[in-house]
Image: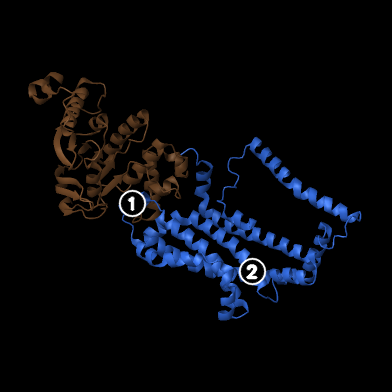
Chain colours: A brown, B blue
Amino acid sequence: MLAIDRVGKIYANTVRALDGVSLTVSPGEIVAIVGGSGCGKSTLLRIISGLDRPSTGVVELDGTAVAAPHPKIGLVFQEPRLLPWLSVAGNVGFGLTSVAKPVRERRVRAQLDRVGLADKAQVWPRELSGGQAQRVALARALVGRPEVLLLDEPFSALDAFTRTDLQDHLLDLWADLRPTLMVVTHDVDEAIVLADRVVVMRPRPGRVLEEIVTELPRPRDRQSAAFDFAKRRVLAALDRAQQRPRSIDDGEAQSAEGASLWW
Amino acid sequence: MSAEAESLAPPLDRPAASTVSWRSSRWRTLALGLMLPVFAAVAWEAAVHFGLSDGRLVPPPSRIFATFAELAESGELWRHTVATVARVAAGFAFGVAAGTVLGALAGYSALARTIADPTLQALRAIPSIAWVPLFILWLGIFEESKIALIAVGVFFPVYLGVMGAIMSVDRKIVEVGRIFRLSGPAMIRRILLPAVLPEYVVALRSGLGLGWMFVVAAEFMGAGEGLGYLLIDGQQLGKPAQIVAAIVAFAIIGKVTDWALVAATSPLLRWQDVATSRAGEA
């Protein structure tokens, strides 16, 4: 279990990026973190990954504090960040140094096969399309079989078709070993397609405003009324997070009776 | 000068996407570029042949070629070339070693950069030939002072190149190394070295180009052998053909060593071929 306990982050320039963020994520759960820019959602993800240290509070995985990058926590960045001097297979196997070479090669091949890029194993990263490169980045993060996979706006740089494609692909990959997924996104559709629970954050300083449990059956139909309903709830929460006048009426979302109308 | 300019140019001249039209236009460019020197050589050869000039101060190509062949046959050319190449090799080795170590330190540590860089930049502003009298006083008239001068010439481009390369390593790529918990040495070997290699090769090439430039200056300081000695000897004895032959020898070995450097490092930079030919797409 991943426990984030009253995590705060104050940068050297005294900007308070995060303030008292607490969140508990159970194994295999998919959590999406949404919020406007500057709400500290990427900072939170970097702290969980161990790349940055929190100013206050603690992140624990299965009861032990995470203070530095952890072998059981993987991270996929917004950009693929492949190493240009390694082949695709070399990139996927980059972190697998602790296993013997034949095992590594077998696992790399299996993982590449899994993301549908078996034929690209010996190609340089430069020769891949944006979507393919992000698939390789996913394979690189998953080949080490992490318990927790963090994704920082992983598909935001892709075109709409590739994006929905990769969202479905991510869920497909998740079903293999069911790691905990934490996805930072500013795409509400993406949050609802992927997540069991959507965490809405509020800026200056970054805090958790609301947690919305979607509980839609999978696979999720992006056109269904239930999907639309969940989307309205999240969008309304985002409005409140930005302290904007309400642009979306979520009156029925607030009451159980209203919700039941939509199911 | 042209050797320097050429060695400073990034290695963009590799044929990558060879199409027929591209190739034919390349041959055309080559032919057009050769037109002027070939015409001048033929014209001068003809002028001397028909007695329009005696060609004593400006020898015709045939005489230069004959001198070159003569020097090569007698073993003189070989002896002088070996002496020059040995000096460049030694100076290059010292310059590269010092430039790499100091450049790496200055690129890696802000403190080292703050301490060392202003002094080195000030030293760089001194025309390197100005060191010659001092080097002769300190190190004598023989090999040491010559090698020191070449090493100084090689040092600065290598130092600047390594420092710049390390400072410009992408933080995002370093974070990939951190996420996979690379140790310090592994981070250097698996992330930093491959990342700086392309710029390092460019720095080595410009260092080598300057090394060839400085060996001439060093051999002008008074040498018993070497291609620079052939130049001075040709001047003092009024043998312009020998001077031009030595210049041709310089051009050939300068180009050959640069090519050897590129050839030796290109297996490590194969990934970059694709990058340069597709740079526009990304």
Q: Is residue A62 left or right of residue B164?
A: left
Check residue A76 in the rendering and tell me which mark sits there, or answer none. none
Q: Is residue A225 positioned above or below B131 on the image?
A: above
Look at the image and tell me in which quarter the C terminus of chain A lies.
top left
Q: Is residue A222 above or below residue B15?
A: above
User: x, y percentage for residue A195?
Assistant: 22, 34
Q: Quadrant of residue A159?
A: top left
Q: Please name the amino acid that badge 2 sits on.
A: Ala
Please report, as a chain letter, where disc 1 is located.
B
Residue B217, label in figure: 2
Q: Nearer the viewer, residue B111 or A200?
A: B111
Which amino acid, by three-letter code, is at mark 1? Glu
Can you say whether B112 is above or below A211 in the image? below
Q: Residue furthest right?
A: B50
> Could you say whether the residue bearing mark 2 is in a helix, strand or loop?
helix
Gap between marks 2 and 1, in whole Å?
Answer: 47 Å
Asked where in the image residue B222 lies, by quadrant, the reply is: bottom right
